[in-house]
Image (tube, grey):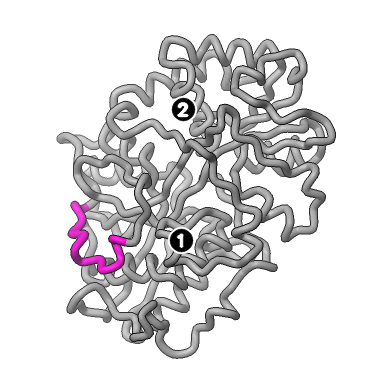
Amino acid sequence: MDRRTFVSTLGSGAALGLAGCLSRDDGTEDGGAGETEDDGTLTVVTYSSMIDGTNPAGPWLKEAFEDEHPDAELEWIQLPDQGIAHYVQQANAGQGIDADVYLGLNVDDLVTVDDGLDGGDGGLFRELDFASVERADRVRDGLEMGDPHGRVLPYDTGYICLVYDESEVDEPETLETLTEPAYEDVLVTQNAQTSDPGQAFLLWTIDAFGEGGYLEYWRELGANGVRILDDWTDSYYGAYMEEERPMVVSYSTDQVFASAEGHDLTRHQVAFPDDQGYANPEGMAIFEDATNVALAYDFFDFVLSSAAQAEIAQRNVQFPAVEPEYADLDEAFDRYAHVPPEPVTVGYDDLRENLDGWVDDWAREFASR
């Protein structure tokens, strides 16, 4: 997955502290979700930037969770290159999955599971008992992934938008504006086959122009010189940060990162064409083969605690999943992280019926640009 890890100045671990038990928001000690067993090893699969890189959230989560649950150990497993498809293949081959939790699911992953799993949908992960997660009711409205089988609980969200250099190009008022001559050879985006933000941008255009109009829109983008690179890293740190292009598909938290790194914010302006941005919540799920389900529910409850939500948001440069009063964010995060006036997303039902076809049709014409 394409993720940006946060790079040092806004990490709040020192301020929140790890000594002793974390405190509940009402001043009492944080406990697990109900009367569960806290001992054993919890094996959690997640994407690489959660556990590697500069100041990732994963090591903080491990230390804080183990501090709260002294008889437990949290073990990270990096998501294989094939992503969620790796575990679908294992399940179809009848192989046991040696992990308890998957941290980093989005709705597209659920569609991949249900389209690829032998024997029908609704498998690979357990249907969650949300009553076993005391803090589940903190999750903000609008982050539901529409899973009819109730397998996933959100823990953060990001908004895909446009980031641009205002000294070189004006803010685009609409997506249609990007096809005008003033925006020729301006935009760089990502391959919808290989990149989360690239696929999100594609789905945003499908939402805007419809199944019958999105390919024609992309043809107009192509005629206007859009550049498509494999992933977010190549497009952002390459073509955009090297000033080969003055506009990139990226995240609406871009200024949080840019201000912390001391970059000139002139080149890090956030645009929401049509007052929109594409919402891409991430969730956590429990594998059907999990051996420590009770501890998994304790981990879910811990991830939704105020301290963990703040750390995940600031280190991953994403928005918390919980209501604002339950995440004590750094002042700079509040100042520089932007929410679109109208978040849009394509839901599970539409994706389940169409996602592969949409992406394949797009890729035949545009993936090699």
Q: Which residue is painted at 55% across and 56% down in the image?
A: 49
Q: Residue furthest right?
A: 167
Q: Position of residue 218 (x, y in %)?
A: 57, 15
2 or 1: mark nearer the eye: 1
Q: Is residue 185 left or right of residue 42?
A: right
**Quadrant of residue 303 in the image?**
bottom left
Q: Start and end of the magenta stretch?
A: 126-137
Q: Earlier in the sequence, mark 2 or mark 1?
A: 2
- Looking at numbered disc 1 in the image, what kind of residue is underneath it? Pro
Tell me the SS state at disc 2: helix
- Tag 1 secondary structure: helix
Q: Is residue 194 above or below residue 320?
A: above
| Residue under numbered circle 1 | 324
Give x and y (percent) for residue 68: 38, 82
> Disc 2 marks which amino acid?
Leu
Task: Give the residue pinned by disc 2.
Answer: 203
Toward the bottom, the furthest residue is 20
Query: Gap between marks 2 and 1, in whole Å?
Result: 27 Å
Residue displayed at 21% across by 59% down: 130
Residue furthest out toward the left: 119
State if disc 1 and disc 2 touch (CB < 8 Å): no
In the image, is 293 to the left or to the right of 64? Answer: left
Q: Residue 245's spot in the image, x, y percent?
A: 77, 31
Q: Say few, some or many: other residues with alpha carbon within 10 Å of mark 1 (under 14 / 14 to 19 / 20 or more).
A: some
Residue 9 vs residue 362, the one in the foreground: 9
In this rendering, the answer to whether 124 lies above or below 66 is above
Q: Is residue 165 above or below residue 328?
A: above
Tell me: 191 left or right of 240: left
Please tell me whether residue 176 belongs to the stretch shown in magenta. no
* Rendered-image quadrant of the C terminus: top right
